[in-house]
Image (cartoon, rainbow, N blue to C red):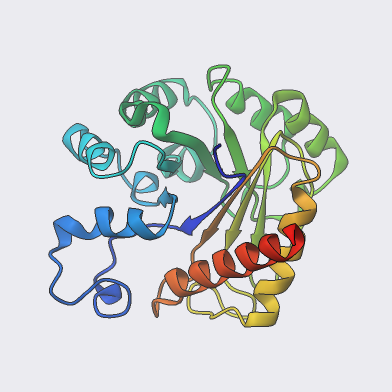
Amino acid sequence: MAPRVLIGTSGWSYDHWRGIFYPPELERKGWLAFYARVFPTVEINSSFYRLPFENMVLSWYQHTPESFVFAAKFSRQATHVQRLRDCQEIVQRWLERVRLLEKKLGVVLVQLPPGLHKDVPLLEQFLRLFPEGTQVAVEFRHSSWECDEVYQMLRTLGVAHCTISYPRYPTNWTVTAPFAYVRLHGVTQAYDYCYSTEELRELARQIRHLLREVERVFVYFNNDTSGYAPDNARQLQTILAMESEMAGN
């Protein structure tokens, strides 16, 4: 049975993780296979900055188990440069490439820029470019999007509202799809913040609550700067596993 909670990190190919997460003697080409023995999922962050090469995507597929799940961050060319306008060709080309992951492709993450304020018709038109059956999550960075009008549109399309932990942005656990998507950047400082045990226990509590409403929860730690992400991800895995074991006794 597939796990209902998938926990991983945003990206895996960080030089500063050598000696923190990856063994110092392990060559870079072995990092993803090592990562996949620890975590069941990863969020591809590089696909936001550039279209990955075909041989790169095929290598990701080949170096992970059959049950492994990738989330892929959608192109910033569409979200940050063209700001969701005239994106049909970008969506088609990008999807053709990441679909080389086949059944291992779980979710497409669309991150909107902070300067893009609420425009429901624009976002809906953009989201309808993704073919039916594509699991899409949207991460907002401006509070104007956090309203019932937007949530209802997302529910109509089956698109997930991405819950984020981010400085000066309220954490919002609104559910709009059969799955939930959570990104953890940091509380008081983005990308270089280590979540405390108490904060991770609270996250575990929120995840258990989400499981009453959704089929699956994807969780990605993006606090990678000092190598906190893999450590926090493993801690959260352990907390949820221990609580599940205790509940079963």
Q: Closest to the observer: 207 or 154?
A: 207
Instruction: Give the left or right position of residue 175, taking residue 231 as reference.
Output: right
Compared to 2, does 236 lie above or below?
Answer: below
Q: Is residue 239 visible?
A: yes
Q: Which residue is depicted at the point 60% across and 27% down?
A: 127
Q: Quadrant of the C terminus?
A: bottom right
Give the number of callouts: 0
Q: Closest to the observer: 22 or 12?
A: 22
Q: List x then y, in percent, for residue 64.
A: 30, 44
Q: Which residue is depicted at the point 26% across and 42% down?
A: 60
Q: Is residue 169 visible?
A: no
Q: Which residue is depicted at the point 53% across and 79% down?
A: 193
Q: Which residue is depicted at the point 69% across and 60% down?
A: 244
Task: Give the residue furthest to the top.
Answer: 132
Location of residue 197 by image quarter: bottom right
Instruction: Give the left or right position of residue 7, taking residue 173 as reference.
Output: left
Q: Closest to the observer: 201 or 140?
A: 201
Instruction: Give the left or right position of residue 114, taking residue 231 as reference.
Output: right
Q: Quadrant of the N terminus?
A: top right
Q: List x then y, in percent, for residue 79.
A: 51, 41
Q: List x then y, in percent, for residue 227.
A: 39, 76
